[in-house]
Image (cartoon, rainbow, N blue to C red):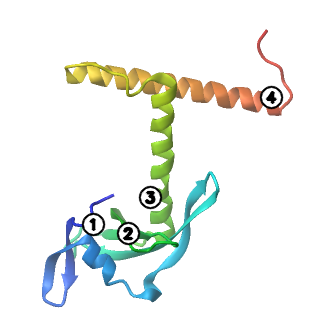
Amino acid sequence: MVKSTEALWASTEAGPQQREARQLGAEIPDSGWRRLSAGAGAKGPRMYDWARVPIRPLGEPGWEYWVLVRRNISDPRKPAYYACFAPQGTSLEELVRVAGSRWTIEECFEEAKGEVGLDQYEVRLWVGWYRHITLALLAHTFLAVTRATAADAEAAGEKRGP
């Protein structure tokens, strides 16, 4: 994600210029928006209106840059912006799918904070912080795999343990 005030290089009538993400998003015509799901949520698919605008006119061969704009269906006044870099020809659906994976990652971190104390560190050096985060995420991974294995065994009718 990028701030709405993030300056991005874009093609204009006067040539390449820096424009704020919100300026680029404001210029998207109504026909440029598509309603797509960003993935499954607790209450069903997370539906938003999405559009993309090409940026970085002097890009790398075979690659493209865009600013991806997400607009809430019920309140379109506060869009979110993503700077994207992907192989040429990447579809809007694929960009939305990748942007939607952000929620899964955030849920994982929230879960790790509650279950294994990801946020319970009091360290003064980077090495200590790195070790704590690594061990907490390893413990969270172990618990997630154990939970999934137990659920699969239960669904298959197997009984594990004492």
Q: Is residue 13 above or below residue 138?
A: below
Q: Nearer the viewer, mark 4 or mark 2?
A: 2
Whether pointer 3 and pointer 1 mark residues with C-beta atoms closer than 8 Å, the reply is no
Label 2 element class: loop
Whole-angstrom CA distance, mark 4 to mark 2, is 44 Å
Q: Earlier in the sequence, mark 1 or mark 2?
A: 1
What is the three-letter code of the residue carrying label 3?
Answer: Ala
What is the three-letter code of the residue carrying label 1?
Answer: Ser
Q: Earlier in the sequence, mark 3 or mark 1?
A: 1
Which residue is disc 2 drawn over?
Answer: 78
Whether pointer 4 and pointer 3 mark residues with C-beta atoms closer than 8 Å, the reply is no
Whole-angstrom CA distance, mark 4 to mark 3, is 33 Å
Which residue is disc 4 drawn over?
Answer: 154
| Mark 3: few/some/many CA within 10 Å (<14, 14-19, 20+) | some
Q: Quadrant of residue 16?
A: bottom left
Q: Which mark is residue 99?
A: 3
Which residue is disc 1 drawn over?
Answer: 4
In the rendered image, residue 156, in percent from the top left (x then y), is placed at 83, 32
Depth order, front residue of 122/125: 122
Say left or right for 68 vs 10.
right
Q: Quadrant of residue 17?
A: bottom left
Q: Which mark is residue 80?
A: none
What is the three-letter code of the residue carrying label 2?
Answer: Lys
